[in-house]
Amino acid sequence: MRHSLVTFVCVLALPPITHAAPGAVRCGKVLDVRSGQMLTDQVVLFDVGGTITSIGSSSSLKLPGGIIPVDLSHATCLPGLIDVHTHLTGDPTGNGYAGLGISIPREAVTGVKNARLTLFAGFTTVRNVGADGFADIALRDGIDAGEIEGPRMRVSGPPLGITGGHCDNNLLPSEYHYKADGVADGPWAVRAKVREVVKYGADVIKVCASGGVLSKGDAPGTPQYTLEELQAIAEEAHKLGRKVAAHAHGTQSIKDAIRAGIDSIEHSSLIDDEGIALARQHGTYLVFDIYNDDFILQEGAKAGMLPESIEKERKLGKLQRENFRHAFQSGAKMAFGTDSGVYPHGDNAKQFAKMVEWGMKPLDAIHSATINAADLLGWGDKIGALEIGHYADLIAVSGDPTSDMRALESVKFVMKGGTVVRNDLAAK
Ligand SMILES: [Zn+2]
């Protein structure tokens, strides 16, 4: 009893991370992400629940009595950004054999740190695709309960994978009898695994369809799950109201995953013309993580990545970027996902400049991290745009990101659901 009393007193001493009043922000400019129009001198008004109730020019919009808007009159406002491929519970230091010494509770603590870094970088929503144990679910729930700061999260729990595949852990010899939580082989076993991760709180299913870069003993280009297994996963997940994200570097696995009805292809590195045509036909989103290649090649060895992983990246990185450009120019749907955790969290926005370097206009890159990402998450009515009925998730930058993409790398103001979590623009 004495322990619980101490806990109770400590909790009372913490400031609540919750929003408790209606409010407004006044923006020098607002990017209407749907039209691409830059609107000047706009006010965004939100209610006690942190939902936008009106948005319009400051001269025409009448503020309710007592509301003094946050002054962002020298800044450009955009909707909060969305990264659809994160690993908040992991850091780049946990690669290879170093990762074996990190417990799941310790990973949850790492997640608390990274959730805050990601939110402060302007990402008010993430889809976390793959975490040991169910640490990501604990993280999501802690954020939703207002106990810790972080983005809105859609989480997968452990990723499904074949025995010995990219999402198993192949570092230990057989006498340790170790396999990763998400390992399942065969159509009925994978259905059971989907049911299991949903049981423990997964919002989305992550599956490793092909080999990968940061795993031992497999090749990124080779298929792992069969078409039959991928179909079973997609059917079971959709029946339970969950979307599926498939890790797939390999040409064949990309096509199998799309044909199986999976909702997004992660990495998409070796996609060919037929794969792009299939993605367009099925409306499948492609997620190309084209920033982290540089980090792996430059910092990977220091970060404990296996030599074979760095060699795999050397072969794959440039092809992935060329295929990103080709897929985009061919009209495939793109969502912004970075694989954060491979590189340090909070640097997510560095991928925007890479996307522009490889063929997108800045507004296309912004679309991928707002309306497109929201659509992929099945959350287009609440996030990804500053519109009535959406959450008041808003960021502000100096300058114009539609002409200077790197403006998004230094976000000055972040608000999530009407709660200001960062304001570097306030008069000091
Ligand atoms: Zn990943």
Image (tube, helix red, strand yellow):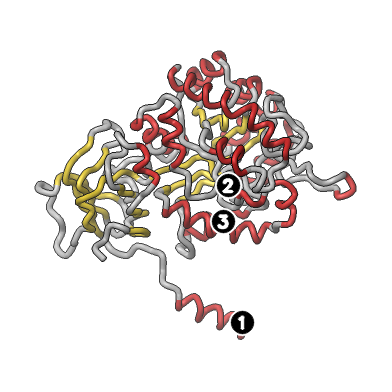
Q: Earlier in the sequence, mark 3 or mark 1?
A: 1
Question: What distance separates the C-alpha of mark 3 from that of mark 2?
Answer: 10 Å
Q: Is residue 14 left or right of residue 426?
A: right
How crowded pointer 3 is (Cα within 10 Å; few <14, some 14-19, many 20+) is rated as: many
Q: Amino acid at mark 1?
A: His
- Can you see residue 192? no
Q: Earlier in the sequence, mark 3 or mark 2?
A: 3
In the image, which is nearer the foreground, mark 2 or mark 1?
A: 2
Residue 206: image location, x then y, percent: 61, 38
In the image, which is nearer the foreground, mark 3 or mark 2?
A: 2
Residue 361: image location, x then y, percent: 36, 28
In front here: 413 or 243? 413
Determine which residue is flagged by label 2.
341
Residue 383: image location, x then y, percent: 38, 43
Q: Is residue 87 left or right of residue 311?
A: left
Q: Residue at x 53, y 22 (%)?
A: 323
Is ligand 1 within 8 Å of the beta carbon of the residue shown at mark 2? yes
Determine which residue is flagged by label 1.
3
Q: Where is 289 relative to 333, above or below?
A: below
Question: What distance separates the C-alpha of mark 3 from that of mark 1?
Answer: 26 Å
Task: Please identify the quadrant where the C terminus is shown.
Answer: bottom left
In front here: 124 or 62? 124
Q: Residue at x 69, y 43 (%)?
A: 305
How crowded pointer 1 is (Cα within 10 Å; few <14, some 14-19, many 20+) is rated as: few
Q: Residue at x 79, y 44 (%)?
A: 171
Q: Is residue 4 left or right of residue 67?
A: right
Determine which residue is flagged by label 3.
111
How crowded pointer 2 is (Cα within 10 Å; few <14, some 14-19, many 20+) is rated as: many
